[in-house]
Amino acid sequence: MPIALAQIPGGSLDPDEIAKFQTPLLIPPVMPRAAKINKVAGKQVDYYEISVKQFAQQILPDGLPATIVWGYGALSAKGNRGVLLHNAPALTIEAKWNTPVQVKWINELTDDVGNYLPHLLPVDPTLHWANPPGGIAGRDMRPDFNSTPPPYTGPVPMVTHVHGAVGVGDESDGYAEAWYLPAASNIPQDFAHEGTWYGFFASKAEASFGETWGPGFATFQYPNLNRASTLWYHDHTLGMTRLNVYAGPAGFYLVRGGPDGDTAVSDTRSGMPAQLPSPAPRENDKFPPNKTYYEIPIAIQDRSFNVDGSLFYPDSRDFFDDITGPFIPDTDIAPAWNPEFFGNTLMVNGKTWPFQTVEQVRYRLRLLNGCQSRFLILDFGNIPGVEVWQIGNEGGFLAAPVNLSADHGNRLLMGLAERADLIVDFSNVPVGNYVLGNVGPDEPFGGGEPGLDFEIADPATTGQVLEFRVVPAVAVDPSTPPQFLQLPAITPLPAASVTRRLVLIEEVSDFFADAPAEALLGTLAGDPAEEPAQWSKRLWVEPVTENPAVGATEVWELYNATADAHPVHIHEVVFEVIDRQDIFVNEDERQVQLVPASAPIPAEPWESGFKDTVIAYPGQVTRLRAQFNSPGQFVWHCHILEHEDNEMMRPVRIGPLQPGQPD
C-alpha cells in the first residue's frame, strides 16, 4: 500500500540553530486545590478551579524569543503557598484513589478587555468540527461551502478530557460535542456558544453532583476509581483537538494510593513493603523547588517554531504532499488539514532539549508521548552502565517488572498518548553528560526495526530528547532494586460475552493519486477466520454502532487495513491486550481475512495489566478485552491527533439511550 510521508521541515526557525541542553528540565509543580468540600455521600471532594489562558512562555533557550501559548492553571489555592501558575504543560493534578476530584474548567481565551482571542493556529473549517459560526442548527457539523474558505478566526471552543479516567459520568468525560466558548463580550449573535451535548450534560451534572454550569465553564467530577496510575488531561474539542493541544493545554493527572498503589509493592527479599524512588513534587512545595525530586513526570512533545518564537503549524495541505488545490468544491481534499504532522523540534515539559541533573542512584520517570503523530522509540543505549526497568503503563503497575536493558536493547516504544512508568538506575553510570535518544521515525510508523524497516529520526535534532547530567550520589540510595519488586497482583477481567469486529481505514482521494483524504473507523461483517470479511466505513455523524450493555465484558478486534500503525484509545475503560494476528487486506474489495494457519502473537510484556491506549499495527488484528460499567455516551478514536480530527473517532454508548439526550 502507498505511504504518504510527512515532511520534517517546519517553520522559519531552523532547529539546528536552537542550542541544545542549555535549559534545566522543568519538573511540573502540583496543581493547588481551591478547597476541600464535603459533598458526595459523606466523602470529601478535592475541588479545583482551573482555566485555560494565553500567555508568553520561554520554551526556546534564553536568547531566543518567548512563545505565545495556551495553558491550564489554577485560579485560586486553598492556602497561601499554592503555585498559581499557568504553564504548558500544566501543573500536575494529584488525586487520591476513591477520593472524588471536582474541577471547574474555565475557558479564559479572552484579552484584557474581555474580547475573544482567535486561535494561534490555522483552523480548517471544512472538516466535521465544532463549527460555532453555524449557530444552533449548524454546530458540530461539516459545513457546506461553495468555494474554499479562509481559516476560522472566531472564538475558540474547548472541553477537557482526563485521558484514562475510569468510572466517570459521561457529563464529565469531555465529550467532543460538549465544548463551550469563552464568556467573551464580542461573540457574534448568531454563533453557538456551546456544543450539542453541553446543555444535556449540564443538567446531568446538576442532578448528579449539584453543580451548575454557566457561560465559559463546566464543572466535571472524577471518582478516581483507577488503579494507581499515570493519567493526563487535554482538550478534546470536535475537529480541533490537534490544534488546541498543540497550542499547549495538557498536563499530568496522577492517581495514587488504593489497593494497587505504591504501598502494595513489596520487596521479594524480605516480603516487606518496597521503597520506590521518591519524593515527587507535592502540593505547596516551594517553586522553584528547594528539594531534589527522584520521581519525575516527563511529557515529550514535538513542535516547530518561527524565528519570532511563535509556534508553527501548517496552514495548507501543500506542506504534507505538495497539493495546492483545487479544493472545495472541485475535490475531496481539505485545504488546511494535514494527514500527519511531525514537528522538527522535541520539547520536554515545555522546554526544547533541556537537561536534567541526576545522581548515581535510581529515579522513577513517568513518561508520556504527547506528540501529534510521532511514535517514539526512546533509546537509553548511549548511557553507559544504565539499567532501565518498566514497572507500569497507562493502567498502573504491570504484572511484573520488565528489564528493558537486558531484554529489549535499552529501548522503549511509545505510541501517541501511551505512558510508561520506569525505574532508571544511574548507579553504575560514570559521571558525565549523556543524551537520551529517539530512534523512532520522522514519518508515519508502521512497526519494524529502526534502521532496517524505516529511517530513524534525524540524529542532530528529533533523534535527541534530553540530556542527563550524572553526578555522584549525595547519600545511599534507599530504593529497592527493580529486580526485587513484587508488583500488585492483576485481577483479570471476566470472560467476554460479545466479540466486536472493527476496522481502521484510510480513504484515498478520488482526485489526487495516493493522497489521503481522511482516516476512518468502521465495522466488519462476517468472520475473517472463515472467509474474507467486508468492512463498512462509519462517519462521526452516523448512528452509534458500538453499544455495549452496562456491565458487559467484550472483546474488540481491531483490524488495521491501513499502511500505518494507529494508537487506539477507548474512553471510560481500561482494557487487557490479548494478542495480535496477521491479516490479509484487500483494499479494492474492502475486505480483510486472517492469514490461514497464522498464530496469534501474545501481548508484549509491557502491555500486561491494563491499558487505555494500544498500538494497532498494519496488517494485523489487535484483540482487546474490556468491561463497560458506566452508562452513557463516550468515544473511541485514533490518538494521532490529525486522524482523530478528521473522522477517525466514533461514539460509544454504554447501555440504553438516555431520556432527553441529543439526536
Image (spheres, rainbow, N blue to C red):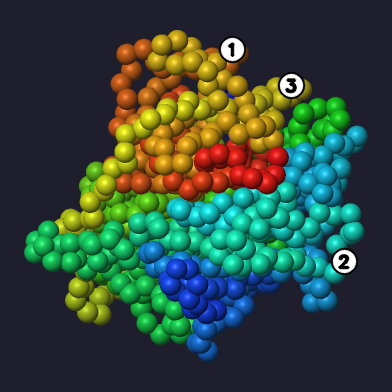
- The answer to whether residue 268 is seen in the rendering is yes
Q: Amino acid at mark 3?
A: Asp
Q: Nearer the viewer, mark 1 or mark 2?
A: 2
Judging by the rendered image, the residue that carries numbered circle 2 is 186
Residue at the (43%, 20%) spot, across then down: 583
Which labelled disc corresponds to residue 278? none
Task: Estimate the x, y position of residue 655 in percent, counting from the top left.
Answer: 52, 40
Q: Amino acid at mark 1?
A: Glu
Where residue 643 sits, quadrant-wise, is top right
Q: Are marks 1 and 2 in contact (CB under 8 Å)?
A: no
User: Tag 2 or tag 1, which sits nearer the N-term?
Assistant: 2
Judging by the rendered image, the residue that carries numbered circle 3 is 510
Task: Identify the image quadrant of the C terminus.
Answer: top right
Q: Are marks 2 and 3 in contact (CB under 8 Å)?
A: no
Question: Of 389 and 532, which appears nearest the observer?
Answer: 532
User: Tag 3 or tag 2, which sits nearer the N-term?
Assistant: 2
Label 3 crowding class (10 Å Cα cut-off): few <14, some 14-19, many 20+?
Answer: few
Q: Nearer the viewer, mark 1 or mark 3?
A: 1
Task: Estimate the x, y position of residue 330 in percent, counting from the top left.
Answer: 85, 27
Task: Estimate the x, y position of residue 240 in percent, counting from the top left.
Answer: 69, 49
Label 2 crowding class (10 Å Cα cut-off): few <14, some 14-19, many 20+?
Answer: few
Q: Is residue 11 left or right of residue 100?
A: right
Question: Of 508 and 348, which appears nearest the observer?
Answer: 508
Q: Is residue 99 left or right of residue 245?
A: left
Which labelled disc corresponds to residue 589? 1
Q: Amino acid at mark 2?
A: Asn
